Image (cartoon, rainbow, N blue to C red):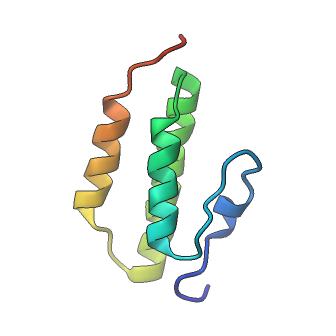
């Protein structure tokens, strides 16, 4: 995959999708997905999305920025659900 291109699994979302073509834009999109979680099911799916993002990032760059990973996980852990 060329550096800076959007991973395929991010382009398959129909309701909400990353608009940029670089890893930073996709990261910002993942943060928006986290902020939009309203149910426990969405939270679980978003955790899978974060995991996939960092697996693809590690494949591309060979290492993961743990600071960013921890920031996303803390955001997920801090979710309070509007619907249960």
Q: Tell me which corner region of the image, top left, top right, bottom left or bottom right, holds residue 35.
A: top left
Left or right: residue 12 versus residue 17 is: right
Would you place residue 5 above or below residue 72 in this image?
below
Q: Residue at x 52, y 31 (%)?
A: 37
Q: Residue at x 48, y 72 (%)?
A: 23
Would you place residue 41 above or below residue 14 in this image?
above
Residue 22 place in picture, x, y as percent = 52, 76
The quadrant of the rendering that contains the N terminus is bottom right
Residue 20 place in picture, x, y as percent = 58, 70
Q: Residue at x 28, y 40 (%)?
A: 74
Q: Tell me which corner region of the image, top left, top right, bottom left or bottom right, holds residue 64.
A: bottom left
**Residue lying furthest bottom:** 2
**Residue lying furthest left:** 67
Residue 9 place in picture, x, y as percent = 67, 61
**Residue lying furthest top:** 84
Left or right: residue 12 versus residue 70 is: right
**Residue lying furthest front:** 19
Q: Residue at x 53, y 10 (%)?
A: 84
Residue 57 place in picture, x, y as percent = 45, 71
The front one of 62 and 32 is 32
Would you place residue 60 above or below residue 51 in this image?
below
Left or right: residue 61 versus residue 71 is: right
The front one of 59 and 68 is 68
């Amino acid at each position: 995959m060329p550096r800076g291109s959007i991973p395929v699994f991010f382009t398959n979302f129909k309701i909400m999708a990353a608009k940029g073509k670089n890893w930073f834009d996709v990261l910002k999109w993942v943060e928006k997905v986290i902020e939009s979680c309203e149910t426990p099911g969405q939270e679980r799916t978003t955790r899978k999305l974060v995991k996939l993002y960092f697996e693809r990032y590690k494949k591309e760059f060979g290492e993961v920025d743990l600071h960013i990973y921890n920031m996303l996980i803390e955001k997920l852990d801090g979710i309070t659900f509007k619907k249960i």
